[in-house]
Image (cartoon, coloured by chain):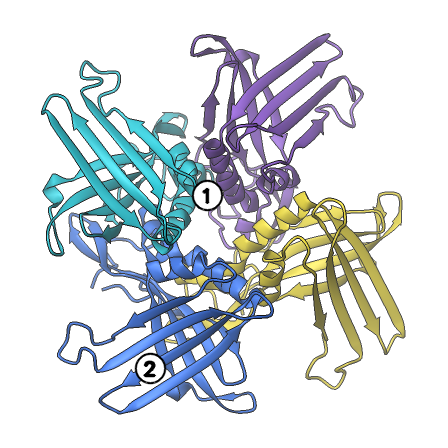
Chain colours: A purple, B yellow, C blue, D cyan
Amino acid sequence: DFASNGNNLGKVFVDYTLFKGKAALSMSPVLPKFSKINAGNMRVEKKGSVLLTFFPAIGERKYDWQKKQVFALSATELGSLISLGPADSAEFFHDPSMKTSNAGQVRKSLSVKPLSDDGGYYFSLNVVNAMLKTNERFYVPVSKAEFAVMRTSFSFILPHIMGWDRLFNHQVPASTSVS
Amino acid sequence: DFASNGNNLGKVFVDYTLFKGKAALSMSPVLPKFSKINAGNMRVEKKGSVLLTFFPAIGERKYDWQKKQVFALSATELGSLISLGPADSAEFFHDPSMKTSNAGQVRKSLSVKPLSDDGGYYFSLNVVNAMLKTNERFYVPVSKAEFAVMRTSFSFILPHIMGWDRLFNHQVPASTSVS
Amino acid sequence: DFASNGNNLGKVFVDYTLFKGKAALSMSPVLPKFSKINAGNMRVEKKGSVLLTFFPAIGERKYDWQKKQVFALSATELGSLISLGPADSAEFFHDPSMKTSNAGQVRKSLSVKPLSDDGGYYFSLNVVNAMLKTNERFYVPVSKAEFAVMRTSFSFILPHIMGWDRLFNHQVPASTSVS
Amino acid sequence: DFASNGNNLGKVFVDYTLFKGKAALSMSPVLPKFSKINAGNMRVEKKGSVLLTFFPAIGERKYDWQKKQVFALSATELGSLISLGPADSAEFFHDPSMKTSNAGQVRKSLSVKPLSDDGGYYFSLNVVNAMLKTNERFYVPVSKAEFAVMRTSFSFILPHIMGWDRLFNHQVPASTSVS
């Protein structure tokens, strides 16, 4: 496997984080993983995503990263957010244990709804864990300007999430990039 | 010739595939091929495209890749799709044997029409083969979110299809890139 | 000086050409030229552009490249075209001999007007040469799809015309890139 | 630290400058600085920005660069400008001495308001310095075409300001990029 940054030069940590009253929302891209198939050829083994991380406020300008919950946006979910009109809403459902014996035990839903005032959106993540009997909810208002950053950076990263840049951007020699 | 990925480090296989009820639609870029003309200078020998591949459903979540039909979108056809308004339609006609003795024997038409409900489009490919006396038709509904992925990735890849990135992105040393 | 493609690996010739009834219109980017100023630092010496080349039809599907006239679009002129609304027009005036003793002898004007039917634009170039007593005019209708290719590729190339990619894209080692 | 251009090959100076009647406005990107954290991994140490530099006209087509004032636009402020509608305004406030003992002594405000006529915007920077008892104001009208250049180049540079390109664009070997 490749490292999640697509090469073996060490990871680079980048994010864009919004600190709000009840919670913070951090987002960072996860590039696809490629595997060698034959003769130096490669294909996508694991698709990329944009990882949203929500973590709660525990005081004024204090946040608890340990209590974070994550939601990995797929290419199509990114397409949904990029093309969201001013009055549109979106809702996505994930089961992190899908296709395992724990399927259905944890249900995550991300809801994106327009803010009334300024052209921004209200992001809320709900995580219900039947095993732990927990029900967590995070609320983060995203302003029009902040959503423009999301839209622009998501549009930028989408082809890379899909691996389309790798057709002409062989930064990693095939001989060294596969473990 | 270059390999279709524009260099000699092996091919990279990437696509974006939509699996729907009657058929699946896969799309992947094909970079232009360059040829050396003199003194290390290069020009486009064969234009790039985005290859659409349709293949039929043959059961629940089962698809038959062997029965695929392809349609290669040119730069201008990509421009047409990128600029498609919510109520717009597009239709493209290809003859894979154009300018050969078999011209007119196989006629392909790709039709893109708005879906009534959600801002997406209905893609249908019709392939009529007079020699084999076959008439195949593939239907794939594309949601607004999926079309946003297409629009974003097509906009990203278009300048590369045209070779404009090669002005500043000489990833392949001239000495090794021409057969 | 750099070569116009921004490095010393040989030039790459790429364009996008529209062949129409009365004339053809070809467009290709010209990257900025940089010069070393000190200690390995560089700055833009000559700004980039997108070169429009018009050449006349001289028969059915025959064109005469020798009779071409060119018009180099600046960053701001590209901005004007990129942001053109469906009913907007634009007109640009160039004097290729500006600030020389021949100033005013050759006047070039590029006019872009909306086509009535399909969302495209009518490009016309007028070149008046007082010395040669010539007055040439080229007309090229550009469809909505073709203009979408122009808009997308011009948006792509604009930051490169401005040299902004060179902040993080040192493809050319400083030691070899300056003559 | 990295150099502000993100590598150690020397700086590259690029800008886009608008010369108007009362003042000129120059803009150029500042990439983020990364620091090594461990095992070849890196993270953003100082965020990137787009630096706006205003300098006054002191005669016909003469400007005084020595009297310049700067305003560094953050990712979210860039998002605000990128998403500005034709009738929208924006205003940003900076205190260059924030969190120091001089906090509040210098107040900068950038105001962006629509021009009545052509779809452009009026940029004005006000710098009040309580220590020097100065109050400077710069006015620069930005046309629709010029703002399209700003919008396109800001959209291009935003993911780089955020460092998101560094996930797949390790131009600088980790071993040499940290001082």
- Residue D107: give its label: none
Q: Is residue A136 left or right of residue A169?
A: right
Q: Is residue A98 left or right of residue D49?
A: right
Crowd tier of the residue under label 2, counting other residues whose Cα lies within 10 Å: few below 14, some 14–19, many 20 or above: many
Q: Is residue D132 left or right of residue D46?
A: left
- Nearest the eye: C76 or D14: C76
- Residue D85: give its label: 1
- Nearest the eye: C118 or A104: C118
Q: Please indicate, yes or no, whether residue B149 appears anywhere in the rendered image.
A: yes
Q: Please indicate, yes or no, whether residue A37 appears anywhere in the rendered image.
A: no
The residue that label 2 is drawn on is C127
Spot occupied by residue D97 in the image (x, y as percentages of width and height)? 22, 21
Which residue reaches farthest front? Answer: D116
Q: Quarter-wise, where is residue C98 in the image?
A: bottom left
Separation of marks 1 and 2 at Cα, in angstroms:
37 Å
Spot occupied by residue B2 in the image (x, y as percentages of width and height)? 53, 66
Crowd tier of the residue under label 1, counting other residues whose Cα lies within 10 Å: few below 14, some 14–19, many 20 or above: few
Chain containing mark 2: C
Which image quarter holds the N terminus of chain D?
top left
Of circles 1 and 2, which is in front?
A: 1
The kind of residue tagged 1 is: Gly
Chain containing mark 1: D
